[in-house]
Image (spheres, rainbow, N blue to C red):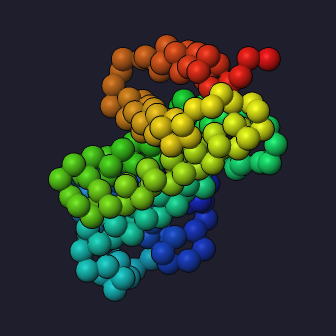
Amino acid sequence: MTQFPSCFEDPDDTRAAIMKATYDALCEHGYSELTIQRIGDEFPKSKSLLYHHYDSKDELLFDFLEFMLDQLEGQMPTYRDGGADEHVEEIVDQTFGFGDLETSTDFTRAFVELRAQAAHDEDYREYFTRSDQFVRKHVAHTIRSGIEQGLFQDVDPQETAAFFQIVFAGTMTQRVTSNDDVLEEARSAFERYVRECLLKAK
């Protein structure tokens, strides 16, 4: 049975049930082999509901992607006033831990598969552009707050946030597309950057 994020457990409405069915089918078959029929095979209700709500596989996937992006945004650590340095450490933990648990590996794989479509599809690119912008805005706010608190060096918040966002995206892709286990070494280097280039010496 496919493992899935808690947001898919016991879906209590039709859209949530469709999203879970899409998720299960995508994880099992991959993007290239995904069809409405295979999504329908995972859907506990009448398959006619799929065609009632969606005219095509792509339309369903765009809605699914919107749903997944909402989940990604929801998994970003919640900023707490005071202690921006601790919040950055939490972001680093989330970045290098995302997808390393059995219950989230399939979610990460599905997310990366859909992101790959943005290489040649403008609609997918628009969704992921918005997601990237969310991550950068979130991290830039944390960096800016840390500078104001005297915890961080006087770095450029936007440039630093862009670096964090690239590391975040690259970590997800590396985890599910390669058997070359370099993430631990990459994390050590990234933590050194945070200590030496971001945090103020105490």
In the image, 149 versus 96, the foreground residue is: 149
Q: Quadrant of residue 71?
A: bottom right
Q: Residue at x 26, y 52 (%)?
A: 118
Q: Residue furthest front?
A: 154
Examine the rendered structure and indicate whether residue 176 appears above or below residue 183.
below
Q: Is residue 105 visible?
A: no
Q: Quadrant of residue 56?
A: bottom left
In the image, 190 versus 60, the foreground residue is: 190
The quadrant the C terminus occupies is top right
Q: Residue furthest left?
A: 120
Q: Residue at x 34, y 67 (%)?
A: 62
Expressed as whole percent of the image width and height from the top left, the position of residue 85 reads: 73, 32
Expressed as whole percent of the image width and height from the top left, the position of residue 96 reads: 54, 29
Q: Residue at x 63, y 31 (%)?
A: 154
Examine the rendered structure and indicate whether residue 40 appears above or below residue 131.
below
Q: Residue furthest bottom?
A: 52
**Residue 97 vs residue 62: left or right?**
right
**Residue 50 vs residue 121: left or right?**
right
Expressed as whole percent of the image width and height from the top left, the position of residue 93 reads: 63, 31
Q: Quadrant of residue 166?
A: top left
Q: Is residue 186 visible?
A: yes
Examine the rendered structure and indicate whether residue 38 appears above or below residue 193.
below
Count of picture labels: 0
**Residue 13 vs residue 26: left or right?**
right
In the image, 114 versus 191, the foreground residue is: 191
In the image, 155 versus 44, the foreground residue is: 155
Q: Residue at x 39, y 69 (%)?
A: 63
Expressed as whole percent of the image width and height from the top left, the position of residue 54 reads: 31, 79
